[in-house]
Structures are given as structure tokens and as C-alpha cells.
Amino acid sequence: MLNKELTNTEKIDLFETLFNFSFENGILYDTNNNEFFIEKHNFDFSTLMGFIRYAEALAEIRGQINMQVAIHRLFGLNKMQTSLF
């Protein structure tokens, strides 16, 4: 089931449900209304496993950013004084 090839309709449903993306006029948009190019990402979105791996990677990135923000707050720094990356 995790490696079953998904239909385009299933892929669109997963992007909308899992990541709150939108699909309009044949174009996929992320949560910031930026066009999302599947080809630019190193994930196989043809299977459910690919979506799971993408979700794991997003969670890890968001966790790292949240940790950096917490450390900056702890030391009284703000974004203007130092970069998050």
C-alpha cells in the first residue's frame, strides 16, 4: 500500500490534506501561495511513502527552526541581530 502508484487525483488530495496546498488551473501552490515544483524536490511523490518522507523532512526542518528561535529568545536575540540559518 505504501508503495502503490498514486493517481493524480490521489496526489492532489494528499497535497491538499497533508500540507494544505492548493491546486488551481493545473498548478500546485504551497501554503505561501508559491508555485510548488515537484521536480525541484528529491522526493518521489508517486507513492504514499514519498509523501511520508516529505512530511518527515518538513517536520525536521520546522523542528530545527523552532529550536533556533527558542535559543535566540533565551539569549534575548531577535531576527535583526542574527540570522536563523
Image (tube, rainbow, N blue to C red):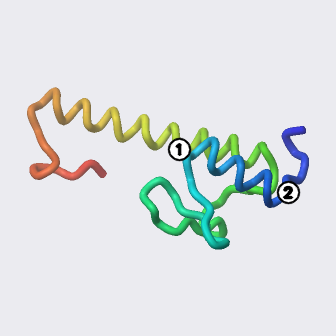
Tell whether 58 sits left or right of 74.
right
Q: Is residue 35 left or right of residue 13?
A: left
Kindly identify the amino acid type of the residue bearing the numbered disc 1.
Leu
What whole-number distance in Å separates the C-alpha atoms at marks 1 and 2? 23 Å
Residue 21: percent from left, percent from top: 56, 53
Based on the displayed image, in which of its 4 quarters is residue 24 positioned? bottom right
Q: Is residue 25 above or below residue 80?
A: below
Residue 33: x and y, percent?
A: 45, 62
* 38 shown above or below 81: below
**Residue 34 numbered tag:** none
Locate residue 80 relative to residue 62 in the image: left or right. left
Q: Is residue 17 above or below residue 76?
A: below
Marks 1, 2: nearer the viewer: 2
Q: Position of residue 75 (x, y in %)?
A: 12, 30
The mark nearer the N terminus, 1 or 2, is 2
Looking at the rendered structure, the secondary structure element under dot 2 is loop
Seen at 57% across and 44% down, the residue is: 57
Other-residue count near label 1 (Cα within 10 Å), few / some / many at <14 / 14–19 / ≥20: few
User: Which residue is label 1 attached to?
Assistant: 58
Name the residue carrying label 2. 7
Find residue 56 and report its horizontal and vertical position in percent: 60, 39
What is the three-letter code of the residue carrying label 2?
A: Thr
In the picture, the quarter occupied by the N terminus is top right
**Pick the front one: 44 or 34:** 34
Work out whether residue 70 or residue 37 is closer to the camera in this orientation and state it. 37
